[in-house]
Image: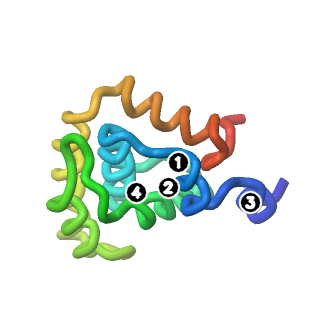
Amino acid sequence: MSDLVALYELVPAKEWLKNHRLSPKEIDCVIALKLKILDGKCKMNKQDKTLAAELYRECHTLKGDQLGDEMHALIARAGETPSQEMIEQIYETRVLAETRISRPVMKAFKARLRDTGLLPAKE
């Protein structure tokens, strides 16, 4: 199945959010995931990164349990193609942010995205 076909079989983030509320801890996960995409350390495939970035765009004003306005401001300053200096700042910020999110919370969040159709199931 092509990436384009697979993309259209998934639920767009805006539609997904109408039926799936995010908890403050899950909003932290969305923010951390966007930071990881921006600093280039995210191991997701291109399609998953695109879908995760779309989810962030829909949540960019929401505050998490631990993360919020400061992180959103950094992401906004970075844009989609951050400078090397900005990437280094994002990396440092992300590493600290991820220490506030337990590994089981992040794993459960990613599993939920796959189980509910926002991200494709792992092959």
Neighbourhood count class around disc 2 (C-alpha, 10 Å): few under 14, some 14–19, many 20 upward: many
> Residue 115's spot in the image, x, y percent?
63, 35
**Residue matched to label 2:** 52
Determine contact: label 4, label 2, CB under 8 Å. Answer: yes
Depth check, front residue: 84 or 44: 44
- Kind of element beneath mark 4: helix
Q: Which residue is mark 4?
A: 37
Q: CA distance from mark 4 to mark 3?
A: 19 Å
CA gap, disc 1 to disc 4?
A: 9 Å
Question: Left or right: 30 with respect to 120?
Answer: left
The first of marks 1 and 4 along the sequence is 4
- Is disc 1 placed on a helix, strand or loop? loop
Lateral position of residue 79 relative to residue 48, left or right: left
- The residue labelled by disc 1 is 44
Disc number placed over residue 3 in the picture, else none: 3
Q: What's the amino acid at mark 1?
A: Met
N-terminal-most mark, 3 or 1: 3
The reply to whether callout 3 and callout 1 are in contact (CB within 8 Å) is no
Going by the numbered disc 4, the residue's amino acid type is Ile
